């Protein structure tokens, strides 16, 4: 929808300008606490299956030996600043640049990683990937503390694939089928209130 794209672009540009002092401050905190890039880039699957780089503030120490596609409860890789950023979802702010570039929307199904997209059934994948992925949606609000549901590196993927993912995909499908501009506004405000409460 043209209106949705214009709204996404306008709000993201204004948001980046207003939040620029906060973005700079958070960048400094990340740089001072641990070595590595300030922005974490990761391949995600977007509109029509196109792969793009999502942008996030880095919340983990650089530890390639202990790579895991999911973040588990009390994950030892997470830094102190990173823990704060994750709990408040401020680590997602750089994705406003993804929205400006047209790779994401403010509201839409969360983009999945290359490691986990394989668990998506093909019929659901076609429906969900027919729109741009978003920074937030009803599934993000419901699973605001998703990592708390995942304990243990090995069993976390099984729990995610068999229990959490099917429920999230149903929420994604419902959004695709019933998306409206008013619904997007409701989700944005629900997300803001969730962050403030947190």
Image (cartoon, rainbow, N blue to C red):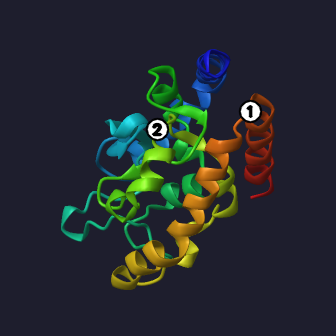
Q: Residue at x 59, y 51 (%)?
A: 173
* Residue furthest left in the image: 65
Is 61 positioned to the left or the right of 190 in the image? left
Corner quadrant of residue 118:
bottom left
Which residue does the numbered mark 2 point to in the structure image? 28
Toward which corner of the image does residue 177 lie, by quadrant? top right
Residue 34 drawn at (x, y percent)? 35, 53
Q: Residues within 10 Å of mark 2 (few under 14, many from 20)?
A: few
Location of residue 79 (image quadrant):
bottom left
Left or right of residue 190, residue 81 in this image: left
Q: Earlier in the sequence, mark 2 or mark 1?
A: 2
Q: Is residue 112 above or below residue 69?
A: above
**Left/right of residue 61 with respect to residue 102 in the rendered view:** left
Residue 187 vs 24, above or below: the answer is: below
The numbered disc on residue 198 is: none
Which residue is pictured at 27% across the width and 57% down the height?
A: 62
Residue 103 percent coordinates (x, y): 44, 29
x and y percentages locating residue 123 in the rendered image: 44, 54
- Mark 1 secondary-structure assignment: loop
Q: Is residue 127 left or right of residue 142?
A: left
Quarter of the image that includes the C terminus: bottom right
Q: Position of residue 175 (x, y in %)?
A: 66, 46
Q: Can residue 88 be seen in the rendering of this structure?
A: no
Q: Farthest residue toward the front?
A: 123
User: Counting other residues with Cα less than 10 Å from the Cα at mark 1, is it few (<14), some (14-19), or many (20 or more)?
Assistant: few
The residue closer to the viewer here, 134 or 18, is: 134
Q: Residue at x 61, y 21 (%)?
A: 1
Measure how far apart labels 2 and 1 are at the Cα level. Answer: 38 Å
Residue underneath mark 1: 180
């Amino acid at each position: 929808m043209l209106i949705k794209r214009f709204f996404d672009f306008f709000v993201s540009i204004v948001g980046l300008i207003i939040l620029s002092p906060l973005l700079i401050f958070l960048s400094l905190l990340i740089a001072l606490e641990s070595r590595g890039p300030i922005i974490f880039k990761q391949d995600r699957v977007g509109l029509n299956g196109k792969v793009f780089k999502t942008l996030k503030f880095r919340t983990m120490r650089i530890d390639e030996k202990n790579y895991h596609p999911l973040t588990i409860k009390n994950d030892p890789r997470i830094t102190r600043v990173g823990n704060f950023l994750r709990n408040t979802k401020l680590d997602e702010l750089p994705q406003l640049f993804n929205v400006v570039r047209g790779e994401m929307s403010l509201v839409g199904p969360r983009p999945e990683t290359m490691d986990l997209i394989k668990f998506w059934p093909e019929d659901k994948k076609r429906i969900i990937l027919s729109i741009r992925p978003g920074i937030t949606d009803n599934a993000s609000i419901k699973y605001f503390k998703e990592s708390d549901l995942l304990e243990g590196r090995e069993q976390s993927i099984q729990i995610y694939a068999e229990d959490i993912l099917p429920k999230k995909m149903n929420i994604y499908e419902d959004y695709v089928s019933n998306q409206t501009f008013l619904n997007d506004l409701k989700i944005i405000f629900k997300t803001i209130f969730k962050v403030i409460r947190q």
